Image: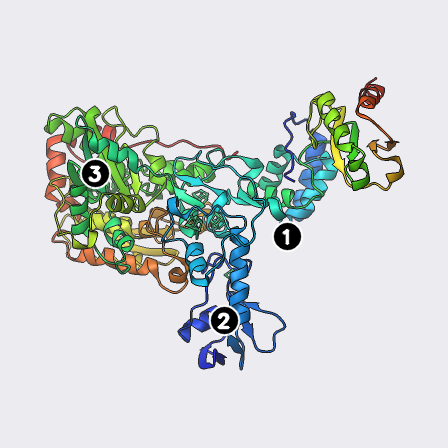
Amino acid sequence: MQKRISTLPFNGTAEQKSRLDAVIAEHKSQRGAVMPVLQAAQEIYGYLPIEVQEMIAEGLGVSLEEVYGVSTFYSQFALSPKGKYNISVCLGTACYVKGSGDLLDKLVEELKIQPEECTSDGMFSLTACRCIGACGLAPVLTVNDDVYGRLVPKDIPGIIAKYRQ
Amino acid sequence: MDMVNIKINGIEVSVPQGSTILEAARYAGIEIPTLCYLKKINAIGACRICVVEVKGARSLVAACVYPVNEGMEVFTNTPAVRSSRKMTLELILSNHDKKCLSCVRSGSCELQKLCNDYGVDETKFEGAVTPSEIDDSAAHLVRNNKKCILCRRCVAACREQYVSVIGANARGFDTNIGCSFEKKLAEVPCISCGQCIVACPTGALTEKDQIDEVFAAIADPKKYVVVHTAPSIRVTLGESFGMPIGTNVEGKMVAALRRLGFDKVFDTDFGADLTIMEEANEFLDRVKNGGTLPMITSCSPGWVKFAEIYYPEFIPNLSTCKSPQQMEGATIKTWYAQKNGIDPKDIVCVSIMPCTAKKFEVKRDDQSAAGVPDVDIALTTRELARMIERAGINFQLLPDEKFDSILGDSTGAGVIFGSSGGVMEAALRTAADVLEGKDLENVDYHEVRGMDDVKEATYHIGGMDVNVAVCSGLSNVAKLLDAVKAGEKNYHFIEIMCCPGGCINGGGQPIQPASVRNFVDVKGLRSKAIYEADANMPIRKSHQSPAIKVVYDEFFGEPGSHKAHECLHTSYVAREKY
Ligand code: SF4
Ligand code: SF4
Ligand code: SF4
Ligand code: FES
């Protein structure tokens, strides 16, 4: 699946930038530096928006497309931030046949974001994941470390409300 | 050179050590098909169309990257090899928009040829295709990823140009060639050189076709449609009609343009002579009056855009002269229009160019001497060939005709603009005469000729040592500029061409397939034809052209005059990378 690109404004801090600059300086002269620098940048910022990738391209003296190509090749890299609460819907076989697709649709409708996106207030992000091993509870979703099972779409607004306050 | 002895299909051959199987097979007169491999540009061994059997090897090997060693036995035409290649093609076709009937590359497509050769079943694996949209955002090219085979030759060509705005994004079934953050080509710092197009084996990348606009202008009785052809077109156009590389078809080209219905057929070589008058004058003026040096040529719009984006600190070094294309157009719409009582608004000026960046250049600001664009439509050599085909003109049978006077009259100095080193040589021919105050006998500056990445020379002219450099291909250019910036190199005058080897190898030229490019010196053959054309000209210095004298006497005054500045010079802007 193509990765979603963040459309939210970038809120990087000076402190984050100086940490990234240090990583870039450390890897600058090394071949294949893009990969380790992207990993460090994701630790620092939590995701890899265009602003961060531009800093990396400029800093390493490579083109933005080269950086972007790597960031879209490896699944570990995210181009969109995670919210304070990340809601992850299991689309594994057991959950899927029990209707987790409908849960995801309901979340898209309620949060007004697509999978792999984050709400503009930074509260919620939405992802689809593979089997988390809680098939007995299917269909399942998690909000950070909390697990919710045997859900139907009308349970969704209540769950969201619980975290909103 | 150390040689190794191997056997290919039972034939014994002795080949230089370090050769690949692909190269070795060539010595034995055996062809191995390729798709992703392009000599000196892309050697990634990815497509596996070039597989062969090597005795003792566990599986088929990729001939384009596999080196030979003593005693090796290779088989290029076994059932296993043929069926593997066929399967590779059928898998490519499972995710390919097979509309050969309407594809510009039909007939010159490397994939199509191989599919024919191997008798593929084009419907063997049908299924989902990777979704993609056509990107026609840029002025010069169109990308249709539905015809892309992911060979990455374009990516490598763009990297060679030190630009790297295209690359492979995502992975697996989603893999696609595109720009960063899914931007369109017009939104990234592409310099419009078209080197990606001439590298592409298929119809995934094509120039933005404007021939319908030209046919429409010709059909409009209210329009006075003028055409002019760049120096290099005469030595490349013939390739589109099956003639050998390096055939000069100037006479037939002019005849074809007349038959297409252009009102006048002029020669951009006149514009090139005019460029030399202005540029030599500008150079001497910078030397005498302490202007910015080194002065760098400005006729290559891909290079100019590259400077504006990637090396803006060199903008003051760029000659303010417009390119020959624009000078020719400016003269047509000012002097010529006035003299013939034509409203410049009614003139449609078409240029035939080796270059896709020319499509960008005609739209630049400060390129409108008569208040309307100097040139309206820039076509590539390939588009002209298509117009000739569509009009049903049998190119081979055409007689030789001459350009219209006087904006079709030129010198040997004009024609060499088509090859790397030509602008420098033409400028030196004129500057040396001016400084020495006489008609010097020597017009040959061999040091700046040839296809080397960088050529340097020092000439003693008029009591001064002039250090010159000639450089083409933007990776080489970047290195050269870095050395100038670091103070390691001290030049007075630099010629820069965007495309490796200059216009003869431009992104708008007829596309030679990898099977030719990998083994034939295409640039060298085209360049040789350019210098032959020069040697055959009665006049070989721009300032001795009678046509040039007329336009200065009647209109521009003298080189560098106020009028000349208004019509023939331009300005540049630093451009943002992101
Ligand atoms: S790219 Fe080649 S194979 Fe594909 S449609 Fe065009 S001519 Fe046919
Ligand atoms: S036109 Fe030149 S700069 Fe632009 S994408 Fe193609 S190769 Fe790169
Ligand atoms: S666009 Fe052409 S050159 Fe580029 S990867 Fe696709 S097929 Fe190859
Ligand atoms: S792997 Fe040899 S040509 Fe592609």
Report how far apart the C-alphas of labels 2 and 1 lie in the structure: 33 Å
Identified by mark 3, the residue type is Val
Nearest the viewer among B27 and B372 is: B27
Query: Can the viewer see residue B163 in this picture?
Result: no
Three-letter amino acid code of the residue under disc 2: Ile
- As rendered, which of B115 and B16 lies closer to the eye? B115
Asked if the residue under mark 3 is in contact with the one under mark 2, i.e. CB atoms within 8 Å, the reply is no
The mark lying in front, picked from 3 and 1, is: 3
> Chain letter of disc 1?
A
Q: Where residue A85 appears, x then y in whole percent?
A: 80, 27
User: CA separation, marks 3 and 1?
Assistant: 52 Å
Q: Where is residue B97 in the image (x, y as percent from the top left)?
A: 48, 45
Q: Quadrant of residue A90?
A: top right
The residue depicted at 49 percent of the width and 75 percent of the height is B17
Furthest-right residue in this view: A136
Which chain does the residue under circle 2 lie in?
B
The residue identified by callout 3 is: B227
Residue at the limit of the structure toward the top, as seen here: A165
Please report the residue visible at 15 percent of the width from the left and 35 percent of the height from the top.
B263
- x 81%, y 37%: residue: A95
Label 3 Cα crowd, 10 Å radius (few <14 / some 14-19 / many 20+): many
In the rendered structure, find residue A30 and report the number of the disc placed on it. 1
Q: Is mark 3 on a helix, strand or loop?
A: strand
Q: Is residue A8 left or right of residue B434?
A: right
In the rendered view, tell whether residue B373 sits above or below residue B386: above
- Rendered view: A10 above or below B414: above
Pinpoint residue B518: horizontal percent, then vertical percent.
41, 62
Give the labeled residue for mark 2: B21
